[in-house]
Image: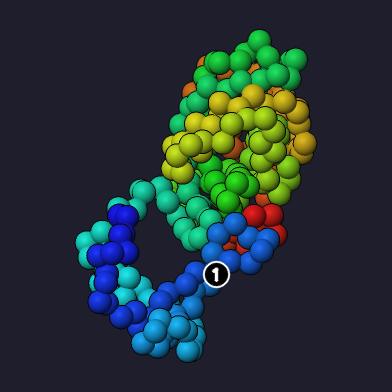
Amino acid sequence: MEVRLGEWEGWIPSWALVAYRREEEATPSAVLAWKLDEEGQPVGAYHPQGEALAVFLGALEGERTVEWVHPRLLARGPGLAVWWRPAWPAPMWWTIPELAPLSGKIFPQPPLVFIRRKNQVFTFALEREERPGKDTPLLMAPYPNTNGRGWVCWGSGEKPLEDTPEAWEAAFFASAFTHTTAQPLRRGSLLKLWKGLAGKGHFPTRRLRGAGLTLGEALERTRGRG
């Protein structure tokens, strides 16, 4: 809501909350509470405790602080979202010559975990189709354009306009897969695997290699890439 300064004539400011960010960061990462004198000049700064700040902002916004949590969301923070995707089928697109004729066909997908840090996306597969926790072991994702650490090379694919799991997933599968960067299979050819899966009903997760880390460990590892 836009505030008109004229509506506040006669009011004396006493405190101000100011959000700060580092020069190399795009979003604020710290908040200071400034004490103001009667002329509105700052005379002292304090680091407000997180709980006290949440209570204060919640009291100002009332019921607007209530937010429905997405049912597949696992974790969330500033610039961060972690969610899982059940083994739903999806159309896939390819520029890899061996698979290009299959572009647009429906392929079975394994259960997946997505980690988004700002505009960086990481994905891993799950052995079982159940909501994972931080101690759940991960499998390597069976996709070209994805390296051994789960990082997705987005290339020229368009990022979604909406910041929702469905929007990111749709953008991921709508982007054409262009090249292989890792070997996520225990044995065999990744391209031959996908070639034989077009129109099938189940993805063989038993063929995927372990990623060598849990979901919690993967989340910590992505800190250096976000």
Image position of 68 (left or right of 146): left
Image position of 140 (left or right of 3): right
Q: Is residue 156 positioned above or below 63 on the image?
A: above
Indicate the position of residue 196 as horizontal and vertical percent values: 63, 19
Name the residue at 56% across, 36% down. 159
| Residue marked by disc 1 | 20
Image position of 35 (left or right of 99): left
From the image, which quarter does the C terminus lie in? Answer: bottom right
Name the residue at 58% across, 51% down. 118
Asked where in the image residue 9 lies, by quadrant, the reply is bottom left
The extreme top residue here reads 101
From the image, which quarter does the N terminus lie in? Answer: bottom left
- Residue 157 visible in the shown view: yes
Indicate the position of residue 213 as horizontal and vertical percent values: 65, 57
Name the residue at 54% across, 46% down. 114
- Residue 217 visible in the shown view: no
Q: Is residue 50 positioned above or below 139 on the image?
A: below
Q: Residues within 10 Å of mark 1 (few under 14, many from 20)?
A: few
Indicate the position of residue 78 as horizontal and vertical percent values: 51, 60
SS for callout 1: strand
Asked where in the image residue 2 lies, by quadrant, the reply is bottom left
Nearer-the-camera pick, 62 or 149: 62
Nearer-the-camera pick, 66 or 90: 66
Indicate the position of residue 102 as horizontal and vertical percent values: 62, 13
The extreme left residue here reads 63
Nearer-the-camera pick, 147 or 159: 159
Residue type (three-letter) at the residue carrying disc 1 = Tyr
